[in-house]
Amino acid sequence: MTTTTAAPAKQRSVRSALGSLLSGNGALVGLLVLCLALYIATPAFLTGPNLVNIGIQASTIAVLAFGMTFVIVAGGIDLSVGSVAALSAMASAWIFTSAGLPGWMSIVAGLATGALAGAVSGLGVAFGRLPRSSPPWRCCRWPAA
């Protein structure tokens, strides 16, 4: 009379492999669960045009994240990235709608606004007494503390 233990060992190895996959890739599993839930709630979620729209909207955040990666690797952290991006986007939109300039010129003006705000922040860190991890509101308090 012989007994086989291959099936329970195989079941344990599959279970442990699945457990390590889930614990090692929690963000990916969460994203897949979220996509499944949104597809169940709205079947148009996983259509081509909607996925392209999501990719276009996420590209701005991706560009900011790539830039912040280099800042963090260099040993600093810049908390004003979001506010500078919003400022330059608003400046570009305001120049396009109110001043009636062409689109390419308003984009250049928005980029110049962002560069100016970044230069002011960089000069505050390099020559002023602002710390490298200064929040954006720190340099704008009056009177300076």
Image (cartoon, rainbow, N blue to C red):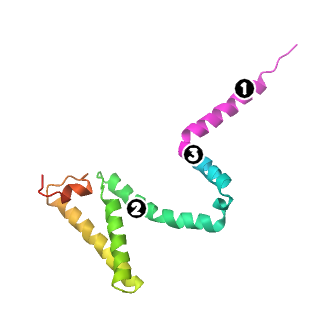
Q: Which of 20 and 114 is in front in this view?
A: 114
Q: Which of marks 1 and 3 is nearer the N terminus?
A: 1
Q: Where is residue 33 in the image (x, y as percent from the top left)?
A: 61, 47
Left or right position of 24 against 82: right
Residue 6 forms part of the magenta stretch? yes
Q: What residue is drawn where x is 81% and y is 21%?
A: 4
Task: Please give the label number shown on residue 64.
Answer: 2
**Which residue position holds label 3?**
30
Q: What residue is drawn where x is 34% and y is 52%?
A: 72
Confirm or deny contact between disc 1 and disc 3 (CB under 8 A): no
Residue 22 forms part of the magenta stretch? yes
Q: Where is residue 96 in the image (x, y as percent from the top left)?
A: 38, 81
Residue 128 sits in quarter = bottom left
Circle nearer the viewer, 1 or 2: 2
Q: What residue is drawn where x is 56% and y is 37%?
A: 23
**Which residue position holds label 1?**
9
Q: Earlier in the sequence, mark 1 or mark 2?
A: 1
Amino acid type, mark 2? Leu
